[in-house]
Amino acid sequence: MTAKIYTKTGDDGQTGLFGGPRVAKDDARIEAYGAVDELNALLGLARCESPPAELDELLVEFQHDLFALGAELATPDPAKLGTNWIGASQIGRLEQAIDHHDALVPPLSQFILPGGSKTASLLHVARTVCRRAERRVVTLARESQQPISPQTVIYLNRLGDLLFVLARRANALAGSQEEPWRKPQ
């Protein structure tokens, strides 16, 4: 007989951390890894739009990273339990991807509105969710009794930058024009 998906252990508004105590479902740690999970799901949605293979390969790679980052955030002591997987090499991959794809789009001389192709629009939404996840991790790092790796904030900061660049690249590949922001008169 297979185990049921529901355990009923969270019916009182508490959830268990990996290798740690039970906490309220609105605890800063849960908010942080919940936002990372939401970002991961949104990248999955963006991938449903069948982006060009070079973008899709990156998005799936970052989905794997985000799953690892979520596990690290869900663990009060990641070093002890071996879930501290996000570090300099993952951040370096993001920076290489930013540099590569940014070189393939026209330089920006003004702000642009989020939009364009459906893939680009989804990547812009993913960028905003990434920024929220970053803010939640910053809050967690400030409030937590356990240390939070600074690499998690750096990773999310770079990923937000990359999602902006990838949205621009998706528009360029789709032949969609970017809409410049117009200052109010």
Image (cartoon, helix red, strand yellow):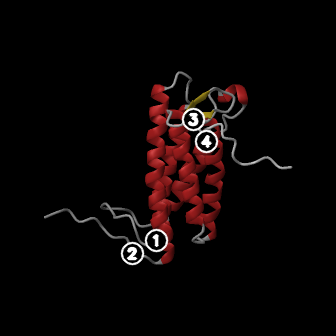
Secondary structure of the residue carrying tag 1 is: helix
Residue type at the position of mark 2:
Gln
Comparing labels 3 and 1, the label whose residue is closer to the camera: 3
Secondary structure of the residue carrying tag 2 is: loop
Instruction: Please report whichever mark, 3 or 1, sits nearer to the chain's N-terminal start.
Output: 3
Q: Work out how far the residue at label 3 is from the one at label 2, CA to CA, in angstroms.
A: 50 Å
Secondary structure of the residue carrying tag 3 is: loop
Q: Which mark is residue 70?
A: 4
User: In the picture provided, is 99 more to the left or to the right than 178?
Assistant: right
Residue type at the position of mark 1:
Asn
Q: Which residue is mark 3?
A: 12
Who's the residue at 55% across and 25% down the image? 147
Who's the residue at 48% across and 44% down the image? 133
Residue type at the position of mark 4:
Gly
Residue 77: x and y in percent read: 64, 26
Instruction: Please report whichever mark, 1 or 4, sits nearer to the chain's N-terminal start.
Output: 4
- Among the 4 quarters of the image, the one containing residue 75: top right
- Among the 4 quarters of the image, the one containing residue 108: bottom left
Mark 4–mark 2 CB contact (< 8 Å): no
Residues packed near mark 2 inside 10 Å, few (<14), some (14 to 19) or many (20 plus): few
Instruction: Please report whichever mark, 2 or 1, sits nearer to the chain's N-terminal start.
Output: 1
Residues packed near mark 1 inside 10 Å, few (<14), some (14 to 19) or many (20 plus): many
Secondary structure of the residue carrying tag 4 is: helix
Q: Which residue is mark 2?
A: 177
